[in-house]
Image (cartoon, rainbow, N blue to C red):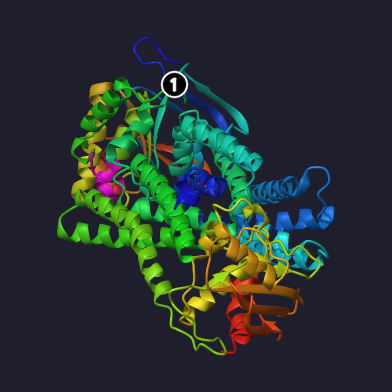
């Protein structure tokens, strides 16, 4: 958790950004649900995603001018607010239900997103990350922009809360007392559009839709009043966001979907708790059930990661393959792997949280590469085959330099006071074909630290099928078990 | 028009036409609303009752003729309760408070005066026991009394109610009419009520106005009420 909340706070921007998106969407979501605009909550994030894809296509995904995030923001805002305007203008004198038009827009926006991505010849990985929402890539500038926009949005929302309520609950009555519900609607939809545009850009359509709907649904199950519904929705949103992040970090899952899953769990807990309480006692017990539900929600990130950690520890052992027997008194040290592919193979921001977090204390964490990830997986895979290993963190600390060869790795180990075997790896090829195949050539050598004698060699050269990986990090994660199974001769 | 013996009208329509997008639905409507009068507005479905209500509220501008209103006239509007979504987590008090906040600027928080006005309105409509209950969980008649309290909390000179007794049992219907009659008697509020159920009004109603074919005609004898239903 130090990566999330410790002094280094590698994920500070991601946690805070996710929190802002969650709270803002949860609050506005109360009106999305009450006004029965849930379908709009799906269609607008999709329109926003289409806007981002269109902006990249039009600008050729260049970094000039406003830069990647600037053009994404413009595309997202224009598409979301444009879609809203289209819906509101089209509502006048329309003979078809709003639901039909929202459904049509959702279908159109979904198709447009896929087509704009397909049309874009460059930068599809980064664009895919942006479309999925990339909280990990949130820069300080993005965070400040999000924080400022959230502050303004919240201020307006609370300042005009009575007007928004009147326009939503009874617009006709609002008109009779001299209030124009169209202005309040314009404010509400403007806030909704801006929040969705910013949210999709930073957290992705799934997270935005999830937080527009689930915390509000959860809150409305138990809240005694509208103010309480807002407060509970914001709290559920905040806890789901941070709790989901903690859970994703521990279990090594994508943060956004995990947060949404936690919010869905909160909804179920509060809905069941609320129903139970109403049956047992009366409406007043709903408040107690809400506390119970929130307690359960709080416990999620504390309990589940424990289960997950146990699961990881208890992973089924694998056959030893061609690896020799070692003395358990001298665990194997894994030196840094060399990258001889002539490309840096940097893992960009899409890498899973856990892997990046595990090298938190390393100075070169920002240059986390495929070679580094393979070193980490080598430690894991050796352990799964019953080989005594040092922790990855210890290896990185005691063998910080990149060895030129296996002999050089042995020398480094000696100088670091290590005894026993040292594993050295050299990556000669790492090419993703784009058709779901990864072409790899990895050479491994195990040498004795004291004598530099070669104890074992192995290699992985077979193409690895990795369908469905959407980022560099996921690619390594999916491919590593097969690569090492071949190299260790245990596939 | 009014003499010294008659109260000044709150609102007067003179040969007024009302409609939508330039097309008249009601033609040549002339009427007066005076304080303390109980008026029933009847007509078959599609006769133009809702259009007339919108015209009286000032939400529609006359396409012809003219509408005269006394300065600072406040009309408390009670819509058909089915138009309000029971999903909103609002208590009876919250709903009444919406009316009490009529003059409250958006930046000012709700104060003691608004709360007191809401409580008084709920008491006047005998709905104080619904103050803490969720609006969506109230029965039809109970909701209706809360909505009348909301309109009353705006401190109106005239109450305009759109079918307040539709779909409620006869006992509740009588109770609602009695509440309205008491408001007319104690506060001199003009009560204008769109209804299909004249029988429940009994002797409370002073005038009956009937819309037919886009025109208004008066049926003044309260004794007709029972027969008309």
Q: Which residue is mark 1?
A: B73
Count of numbered badges drawn on the protein: 1
A119 up-or-down from A454: above or below:
above
Q: Nearer the viewer, residue A148 or A125?
A: A125
Q: Nearer the viewer, residue B68 or A306?
A: A306
Chain name for mark 1? B
B65 up-or-down from A323: above or below:
above
Q: Nearer the viewer, residue A130 or A108?
A: A130
Q: Which residues are magenta?
A: B132-145
Q: Nearer the viewer, residue A404 or A173?
A: A404
Q: Quadrant of residue A488?
A: bottom right
In the orientation shown, which residue stands out farthest toward the top? B4
Badge 1: how crowded within 10 Å, few (<14), some, or many (20+)?
few
- Would residue A61 appear left or right of A141 to someone viewing this image? right
Query: Helix, strand or loop at disc 1?
Result: loop
Q: Residue at x 46, y 18 (%)?
A: B70
- Would residue A393 appear left or right of A337 to someone viewing this image? left
Residue B57, horizontal then vertical, whole percent: 48, 32
């Amino acid at each position: 958790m130090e990566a999330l909340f410790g002094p280094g706070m590698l994920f500070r921007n991601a946690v805070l950004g996710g929190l802002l998106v969650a709270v803002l969407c949860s609050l506005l979501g109360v009106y999305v649900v009450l006004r029965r605009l849930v379908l709009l909550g799906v269609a607008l994030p999709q329109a926003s995603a289409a806007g981002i894809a269109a902006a990249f296509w039009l600008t050729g995904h260049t970094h000039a001018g406003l830069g990647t995030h600037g053009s994404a923001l413009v595309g997202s805002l224009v598409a979301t607010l444009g879609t809203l305007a289209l819906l509101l203008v089209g509502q006048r004198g329309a003979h078809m239900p709003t639901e039909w038009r929202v459904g049509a827009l959702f279908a159109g926006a979904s198709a447009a997103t896929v087509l704009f991505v397909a049309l874009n010849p460059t930068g599809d990985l980064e664009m895919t990350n942006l479309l999925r929402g990339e909280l990990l890539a949130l820069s300080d500038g993005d965070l400040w922009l999000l924080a400022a926009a959230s502050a303004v949005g919240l201020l307006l929302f609370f300042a005009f809360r009575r007007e928004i309520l009147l326009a939503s609950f009874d617009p006709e009555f609002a008109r009779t007392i001299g209030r124009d519900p169209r202005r309040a609607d314009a404010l509400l939809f403007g806030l909704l559009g801006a929040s969705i545009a910013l949210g999709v850009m930073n957290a992705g359509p799934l997270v935005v839709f999830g937080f527009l709907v689930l915390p509000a649904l959860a809150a409305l199950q138990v809240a005694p009043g509208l103010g309480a519904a807002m407060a509970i929705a914001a709290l559920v949103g905040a806890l789901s966001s941070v709790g989901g992040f903690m859970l994703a970090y521990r279990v090594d899952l994508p943060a956004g979907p995990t947060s949404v899953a936690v919010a869905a769990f909160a909804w179920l807990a509060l809905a069941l708790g609320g129903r139970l309480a109403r049956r047992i006692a009366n409406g007043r017990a709903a408040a107690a059930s809400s506390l119970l539900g929130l307690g359960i929600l709080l416990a999620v990130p504390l309990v589940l990661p424990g289960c997950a950690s146990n699961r990881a520890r208890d992973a089924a052992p694998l056959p030893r393959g061609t690896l020799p027997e070692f003395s358990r008194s001298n665990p194997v040290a894994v030196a840094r792997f060399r990258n001889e592919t002539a490309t840096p193979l940097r893992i960009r921001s899409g890498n899973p949280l856990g892997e990046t977090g595990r090298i938190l204390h390393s100075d070169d964490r920002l240059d986390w590469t495929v070679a580094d990830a393979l070193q980490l997986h080598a430690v894991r895979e050796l352990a799964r085959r019953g080989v005594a290993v040092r922790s990855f963190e210890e290896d990185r600390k005691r063998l910080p330099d990149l060895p030129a060869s296996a002999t050089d790795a042995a020398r480094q180990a000696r100088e670091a006071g290590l005894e026993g075997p040292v594993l050295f790896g050299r990556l000669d090829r790492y090419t993703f074909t784009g058709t779901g195949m990864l072409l790899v050539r990895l050479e491994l050598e195990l040498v004795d630290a004291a004598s530099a004698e070669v104890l074992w060699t192995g290699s992985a050269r077979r193409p690895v099928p990795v369908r469905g990986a959407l980022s560099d990090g996921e690619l390594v994660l999916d491919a590593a078990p097969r690569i090492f199974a071949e190299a260790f001769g245990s596939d | 028009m009014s003499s010294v013996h008659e109260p000044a009208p709150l609102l007067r329509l003179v040969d007024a036409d009302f409609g939508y997008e330039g097309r008249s639905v009601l033609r040549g409507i002339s009427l007066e609303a005076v304080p303390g009068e109980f008026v029933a507005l009847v007509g078959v479905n599609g006769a133009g009752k809702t259009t007339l209500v919108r015209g009286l509220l000032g939400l529609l501008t006359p396409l012809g003729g003219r509408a005269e209103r006394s300065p600072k006239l406040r009309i408390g509007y009670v819509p058909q309760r089915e138009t309000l979504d029971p999903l909103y987590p609002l208590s009876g008090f919250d709903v009444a408070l919406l009316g009490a906040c009529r003059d409250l600027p958006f930046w000012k928080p709700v104060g003691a005066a608004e709360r007191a006005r809401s409580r008084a309105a709920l008491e006047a409509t005998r709905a104080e026991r619904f103050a803490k209950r969720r609006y969506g969980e109230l029965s039809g008649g109970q909701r209706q009394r809360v909505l009348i309290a909301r309109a009353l909390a705006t401190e109106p000179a005239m109450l305009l109610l759109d079918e307040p007794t539709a779909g409620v049992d006869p006992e509740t219907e009588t109770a609602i009419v009695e509440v309205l009659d008491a408001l007319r008697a104690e506060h001199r509020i003009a009560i204008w009520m769109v209804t299909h159920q004249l029988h429940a009004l009994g002797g409370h109603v002073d005038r009956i106005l009937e819309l037919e074919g886009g025109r208004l005609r008066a049926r003044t004898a309260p004794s007709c009420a029972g027969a008309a239903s």
